[in-house]
Image: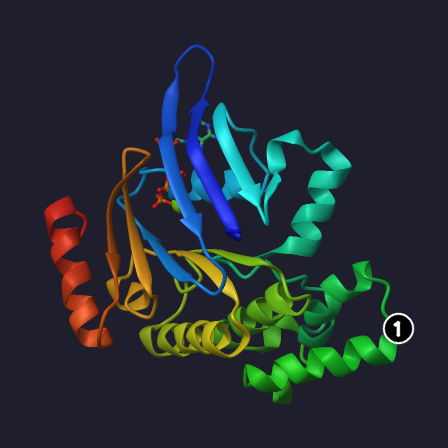
Amino acid sequence: MSVLSVEQVTKIYGSKVKIRAVDHLSLSVEKGEFIAVMGASGSGKSTLLNLISGILPLTSGEIRIDGKDISRLNEEEAARLRRDKLGFVFQDYNLVDTLTLGENIMLPLMFQKKDPDTMRREAHIYAKKLGIDTVFDSRTYEVSGGQAQRAAIARAIIHHPSLLLADEPTGNLDSASAQQVMRIFAALNTEEQVSSLVVTHDPRTASFCGRVVFIRDGKVFHELYREDNQLHFYDEILSVLKFLGGA
Ligand SMILES: Nc1ncnc2c1ncn2[C@@H]1O[C@H](COP(=O)(O)OP(=O)(O)OP(=O)(O)O)[C@@H](O)[C@H]1O
Ligand SMILES: [Mg+2]
């Protein structure tokens, strides 16, 4: 069973003026896959992620997460599915500024009603793994962008979601921090079999993934699978982007 299956999904925004943001798009993600989604601005990448996370209703088609059809869930079931099965990472980190990094990392465990000691212990394990244990008790405004994003990643995976969704996770980072963050995504993918879908404009970021899905006008335009080394994959990605006119 696929972790995610998107079947012939269409999303039309607006009532008078209609914008077909996603158009009969199909895509499936198997357990442990690490996928980049690329495409020009306005091609429908964020819309696709918001449909998968159940924040936006579909116009037509079907989306299944771990085999569950998300459009058939009521509000409460959808919220539970988002909380238990999905992890999110955003471009602007979305950390809670009144909490420390460590408390931010623990947030998903609070919903699972774990006791405070267990939460702290598990949060420390992830903070160590991501190299931010030294800033565990710092506030969000006391740390660098790379550290904040690593805390956001820890928060996104601490509850072992089936699928990690990231929209431009390296968009606000300098290239060294961006590479570090992508190495972490890649390590989590190999070590913990975290399945991820990462939207990015950056071919360097995409070259860390095992597959790149290119979207144009809301449709899957092309797919590339990484076969050998990252540098060669990077070149292949660049060629497709040149063809797409997005490089
Ligand atoms: N809430 C909305 N209402 C109406 N139209 C929208 C809405 N959100 C997005 N769109 C339109 O849908 C299309 C796809 O937008 P989307 O944000 O998914 O693109 P994107 O690929 O994420 O772009 P970017 O790379 O700039 O983030 C665009 O034409 C956009 O203007
Ligand atoms: Mg977007």
Question: Measured along the vertical axis of the image, is residue 215 above or below residue 115?
Answer: above
Applied colour scheme: rainbow
> Viewed as shown, does residue 100 lie left or right of 55?
right
**Residue that sits furthest to the front in the current view:** 1
Give the amino acid type for the residue marked by disc 1 in the picture. Answer: Asp
User: What residue sits 44% from the left and 40% below the top?
Assistant: 48
Q: Residues within 10 Å of mark 1 (few under 14, many from 20)?
A: few
Quarter the C terminus occupies: bottom left
Tally of numbered discs: 1
Q: Position of residue 142 (x, y in %)?
A: 60, 77
Q: Quadrant of ligand 1?
A: top left
On whether ligand 2 comes within 8 Å of the CB at mark 1, the answer is no
User: What residue sits 66% from the left and 48% below the top?
Assistant: 82
80, 15: nearer the viewer: 80
Residue at the disc numbered 1 = 115
> Viewed as shown, does residue 218 lie left or right of 127?
left
Question: Measured along the vertical axis of the image, is residue 77 above or below residue 129?
Answer: above
Determine the image quadrant of residue 100.
bottom right
User: What residue sits 61% from the left and 87% below the top?
Assistant: 128
User: What residue sits 44% from the left and 61% below the top?
Assistant: 169
Determine the image quadrant of residue 77.
top right
- Could one spot residue 137 in this view of the protein? no
Q: Position of residue 40 (x, y in %)?
A: 26, 44
- Could one spot residue 78 in this view of the protein? yes
180, 113: nearer the viewer: 113
Q: Position of residue 14 (x, y in %)?
A: 46, 18
User: Dot 1 lies on which element?
Assistant: loop
